[in-house]
Amino acid sequence: MPDLVLLDEVDSTMDEVHRRAEWGGGHGLAVVAARQVSGRGRLGRRWAAGDGGLWCSVLARDMGSTELGVLSLRVGIAVALSLESAIPRLPRVMLKWPNDLRLAERKVGGVLIEARWQGTRADWVVIGVGVNLRNRVPDEFATEAASLAEVTTVPTPEAMAPLVVDAIRGATTRVGSLDSDELEAWSLRDDLFGRRIMMPVTGIAEGITADGSLRVRQRDGLLVMVRTGEVAADGAPT
């Protein structure tokens, strides 16, 4: 079995796994920390990561370009399903392309993917997942983020960590593009579907494709495939 390292405090589980990858850590190595003092999200944003939340990162090696292109979506699906199966009375966890887990219009978790490259090949990939379980969300983020404990009774991070880590590891073993089961699981949880997108292009979100692209229907009827970028949506689905 790959290593599962439990730590009280780290700067970032992402950085810790990168260090262990440099030391020769193998595929599936996971680090879980009770606290992160320098947790980060996508685009370098600060992620408040105190006691009571689930903060983990997993090492993946030998990832192909196709798998890497859909990895954040694939992991998001796997983590959402693991949370729903493990927490009774938890509402369906919604997914916002490309990497957010949401409940009732607020973010409860996220996925971060970082690769280290040798030329055009990914030498290794670190998959970070943060889930607000029982931790207190700072006041400045309270309108846009929430903890699952605000919705229902949730297990401890110690109890949830092996389940979420196994879900992430399982996602790394899948090959190729998103399959029909994954696309269906996403469509049931698609937080953007039917919403008006303001950036990186304008239009109405119409789901995702097997290669992980976001489908956006523009006003003139043109269907645009968005591969990367920061998404801003305006209001409820139309």
Image (spheres, grey):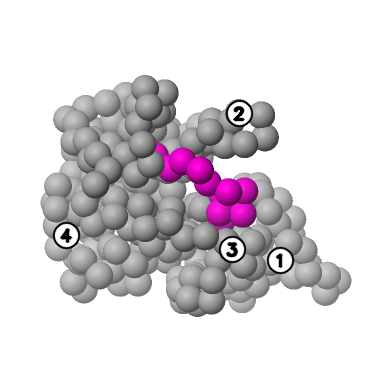
Q: Amino acid at mark 4?
A: Val
Magenta stretch: includes residue 63: yes
Residue carrying label 2:
118
Residue carrying label 3:
177
Residue carrying label 4:
154
Q: Comparing marks 2 and 1, which lies closer to the viewer?
A: 2
State how far apart marks 2 and 4 are (Cα): 41 Å
Q: Position of residue 197 (x, y in %)?
A: 66, 61
Nearest to N terminus: mark 2 or mark 4: 2
Q: Amino acid at mark 2?
A: Gln
Q: Comparing marks 3 and 1, which lies closer to the viewer?
A: 3
The image quarter in which residue 171 lies: bottom left
Viewer-closest of 211 and 94: 211
Quarter of the C terminus within the rendering: bottom right
Nearest to N terminus: mark 3 or mark 1: 3
Q: Which residues are magenta?
A: 57-70
Left or right side of 37 for 97:
right
Left or right side of 122 for 8:
left
State how far apart marks 4 and 1 are (Cα): 36 Å
